[in-house]
Image (cartoon, helix red, strand yellow):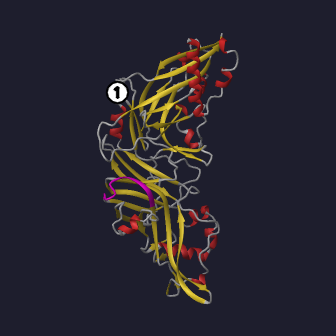
């Protein structure tokens, strides 16, 4: 009876482990005469601690803008962001002679604006916030790795005499009527007008920024031949910096530069005047980067709490875990490790608040030595040395079902490397393709926070890695 009980354990391990597509060796371990197979379960304690992230690789398709205070920890978080704008190849304005927006016979734009569209936000949508939109002097470099502590102002990327516009806003724009705000086709946005007089780098004055863009096109359409030329010749980008206010954080999904003008078109045999708009958007084809300013004193206080560990984003706190590799391998180097499972229970918030930060939904486990290169190199999880665990609301925990291949890889490392047996648990966003395959893993830059069971003074049940070995007698 004992044999059948143990066989059930390993069969169960196979089923659960297969969910992570990392069971390469399980099949081979079950081949052969089952009567000659010896299966041994074991548990080993693991240790964890909180580590301050300092900064994270910050190339993302979402821009974060605002300032909030975490109601549970009291930590302040401020987000600014930079963006460039994409243009279609060989973009064209209407034929010059068709333009009807004219002053003294010269082409002008009727108006110009920046729109920061958001589908989600944190906090109070009626909180009054203040930002400044800065024109950049030079573009972000394509070959540079931008981290969340990067300050474009200190690095000289902001144009001294360029556009600098202050904007007071609330995320619920009360200047837009309620019916429009509630329309399913309406996307909430922050609007920054660029209708002030503009002087370009050559000292040429225009009545607004849109006029500058239009006239530059008619002077030389090749300025619009591709995004690289557009960015390096005309619009290096904009930096949106928080200057005041507290209580909201907008998750900017699309940044858009719009130029409005009038032009004539022939409808049947009648010449009519229509309103035209040329739009240039911040997309994955161009660079965007979020700058995060955290309350470092609060982060240090939280990281020093040894009764638990923390996961906080953006660029806040990670959890470091030490795997007892030598204990796991001792006496088992000729065995097959079928599964090695780690469960990280979550500790519920101490305070109940309608503005409590969200629970991280996806955690990435990677070797501590790969904490930076994994993201810089655009890697995705392989379930060999990198793993994803999603939050299980029913169990209030995260489960890494089978990290046996990671344990084996660690056993081959040089013991003089201080990180040889350490992994880091990082909150991430995960992108899937239509076949439900992971195609992108990025740092989670949204507002999330949770406490995990662990720490050197853990008052709960010890954290363990549960291992199942097998070998032939």
Locate residue 409 relative to residue 208 in the image: left or right.
Answer: right
Whether residue 407 appears in this view of the structure is no
Looking at the image, which is closer to me, 141 or 370?
370
Whether residue 180 appears in this view of the structure is yes
Percent x, y of residue 464: 46, 22
Locate residue 437 relative to residue 49 in the image: left or right.
Answer: right
**How many other residues sit within 10 Å of disc 1, few (<14), some (14-19) or many (≥20)?**
some
Q: Quadrant of the N terminus?
A: top right
Residue at the top extreme, as displayed:
473
**Dominant secondary-structure state across the stretch colored magenta:** strand
Q: Quadrant of the C terminus?
A: top right
For the point 52% across and 87% down, which residue is it?
105
Locate residue 372 relative to residue 318 in the image: left or right.
Answer: right
For the point 50% across and 47% down, which residue is it?
58
Q: In the rendered structure, does residue 252 fall within the stretch colored magenta?
A: no
Percent x, y of residue 93: 59, 75
Percent x, y of residue 42: 52, 16
Q: Helix, strand, or loop for circle 1?
A: loop
Q: Which residues are magenta?
A: 117-127
Q: Is residue 298 above or below residue 163?
A: above
- For label 1, the residue is 307
Q: Is residue 173 above or below residue 458?
A: below
Percent x, y of residue 318: 44, 35
């Amino acid at each position: 009876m004992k044999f059948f009980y143990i066989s059930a354990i390993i069969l169960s391990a196979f089923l659960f482990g297969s969910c992570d597509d990392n069971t390469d060796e399980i099949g081979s371990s079950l081949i052969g005469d089952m009567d000659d197979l010896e299966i041994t379960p074991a548990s080993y304690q693991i240790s964890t601690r909180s580590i301050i992230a300092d900064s994270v690789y910050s190339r993302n398709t979402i821009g974060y803008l605002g300032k909030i205070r975490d109601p549970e920890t009291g930590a302040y978080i401020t987000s600014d962001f930079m963006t460039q704008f994409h243009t279609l190849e060989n973009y064209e304005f209407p034929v010059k002679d068709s333009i009807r927006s004219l002053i003294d016979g010269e082409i002008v734009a009727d108006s110009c604006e920046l729109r920061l569209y958001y589908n989600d936000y944190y906090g109070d949508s009626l909180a009054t916030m203040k930002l400044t939109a800065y024109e950049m002097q030079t573009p972000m470099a394509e070959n540079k790795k931008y981290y969340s502590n990067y300050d474009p102002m200190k690095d000289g990327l902001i144009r001294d005499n360029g556009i600098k516009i202050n904007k007071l806003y609330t995320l619920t724009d009360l200047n837009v009527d309620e019916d429009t705000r509630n329309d399913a086709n309406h996307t909430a946005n922050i609007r920054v007008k660029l209708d002030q007089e503009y002087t370009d780098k050559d000292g040429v004055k225009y009545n607004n920024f849109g006029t500058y863009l239009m006239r530059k096109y008619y002077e030389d359409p090749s300025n619009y031949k591709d995004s690289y030329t557009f960015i390096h010749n005309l619009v290096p980008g904009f930096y949106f910096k928080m200057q005041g206010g507290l209580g909201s954080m907008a998750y900017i999904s699309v940044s858009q530069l719009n130029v409005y003008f009038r032009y004539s078109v022939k409808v049947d045999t009648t010449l009519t005047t229509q309103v035209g708009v040329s739009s240039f958007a911040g997309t994955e084809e161009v660079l965007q980067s979020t700058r995060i300013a955290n309350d470092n004193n609060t982060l240090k206080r939280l990281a020093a709490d040894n009764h638990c560990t923390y996961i906080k984003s953006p660029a806040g706190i990670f959890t470091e875990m030490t795997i007892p590799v030598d204990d796991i391998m001792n006496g088992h180097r000729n065995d097959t490790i079928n599964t090695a499972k780690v469960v990280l229970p979550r500790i519920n918030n101490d305070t109940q608040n309608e503005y409590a930060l969200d629970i991280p939904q996806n955690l990435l486990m990677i070797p501590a030595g790969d904490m930076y290169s994994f993201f810089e190199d655009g890697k995705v999880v392989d379930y060999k040395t990198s793993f994803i665990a999603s939050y299980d609301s029913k169990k209030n925990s995260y489960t890494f079902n089978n990290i046996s291949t990671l344990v084996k890889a660690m056993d081959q490392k040089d013991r003089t490397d201080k990180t040889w047996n350490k992994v880091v648990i990082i909150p991430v966003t995960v992108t899937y393709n239509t076949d439900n395959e992971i195609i992108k893993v990025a740092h989670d830059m949204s507002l999330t926070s949770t406490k995990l069971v662990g720490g050197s003074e853990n008052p709960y049940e010890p954290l363990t890695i549960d291992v199942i070995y097998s070998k032939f007698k």
